[in-house]
Image (cartoon, rainbow, N blue to C red):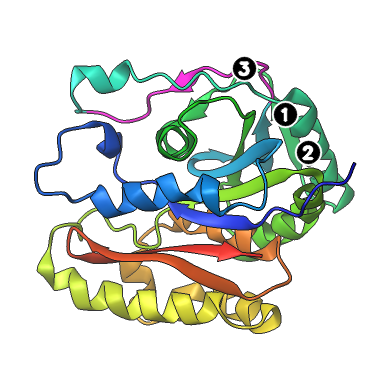
Amino acid sequence: MTNTRQPTLFIPHGGGPCFFMDDPAGNWTGMAAYLRSIAASLPERPKAILVVSGHWETRGFAFTGAATPPLVYDYGGFPAHTYEIRYDSPGDPALATRAADLLRSAGLTASVDPTRGLDHGVFIPMKVAFPDADIPVVEMSVDRDLDPALHAAAGRALAPLRDEGVLIVGSGMSFHNMRGYGDPRFTAPSEAFDQWLTAAVEADPTARAAALGHWAEAPAGRLSHPREEHLLPLMVAAAASDQPGTQVYGERVLQTAISGYRFN
């Protein structure tokens, strides 16, 4: 049997446990609807999901290797019930080892962490997108040096997993300036960066790689990402594809432009 090639995705994971809280203003309604649409948009059910989270930074890259990964409630100040959210998906130690081996073969530093759990950059959006928690999930860290080229190299190395039934997901936010959310002064700059980012993603892969490698020079680039850990998962997802990307989600959230992308 052969697997159908899975796309790669860059998804917004929202703010903390936002999808599981009262939301009378409907701030997260559209984003939640996009996440819920992902499963039906795939060519077939993934055998496993590899999620690159902007909330786990390591020296080199690391993968969760637990057979039953715990959850890391790495958010603070939210209602008590949000610390009781469960997402009891199985892990996939073999996939973690395979992914680490692919990176090492490409000359990158990679390890498997047998105890690390899934942080909210993984279990919150996955609980919305795949609520049955019956698909194995492995989390991948970002490298703490925050080098776009390094993350692109990791994405290229991981590309073979797509033909093995693995869905590669970059989980972050296309705009991530905590001071900007809800502030109308950030609307225009966030939209300028969003337009640039979408054009970069939708360019041919060579031009895309060059643009994303210099994202900080984009209009309002550094204003949109004072620190780029939430943008780097995009570098991995994009580089794992040799096709132009597509904007599959775009919305103004808390007065800032937010996008999600797909790469076939």
Q: Quadrant of residue 99?
A: top right
For mark 2, give the secondary structure.
helix
Q: Is residue 63 above or below residue 144?
A: above
Measured in 3D between alpha carbons, the distance from the residue under mark 2 to the one under mark 3, in whole angstroms, is 16 Å
Q: Which residues are magenta?
A: 65-76
The location of residue 126, given as percent across then percent down, is 47, 36
Q: Which residue is mark 1?
A: 112
Q: Is 68 left, or right, of 180 in this rendering?
A: right
Number of residues whose C-alpha sits closer than 10 Å to that of mark 1, classed few (under 14), some (14–19) or many (20 or more): many
For the residues bearing labels 1 and 2, Cβ distance under 8 angstroms = yes
> With respect to residue 118, does 157 lie above or below?
below
Along the horizontal axis of the image, is 185 left or right of 114?
left
Residue at screen point 65% across, 41% down: 45
What amino acid is found at the position of numbered circle 2 in the picture? Ala
Residue drawn where x is 75% and y is 43% of the image: 165
The earlier-in-sequence mark between 2 and 3 is 2
**Which sits in the foreground, 65 or 218?**
65
Q: Nearer the viewer, residue 208 or 2?
A: 2
- Label for residue 100? 2
In percent of the image, x 65 and y 23: which residue is there?
91
Residue that carries the numbered disc 3 in the rendered image = 115
Q: Report the amino acid beneath label 3.
A: Thr
Image coordinates of residue 202 in percent, x first then y, are: 55, 78
Task: Name the residue: 67% across, 62% down.
Answer: 152
The numbered disc on residue 177 is none
Q: Residues within 10 Å of mark 2 (few under 14, many from 20)?
A: many
Check contact, mark 2 vs mark 3: CB within 8 A. Answer: no
Report the side of 177 relative to 130 (left or right).
left
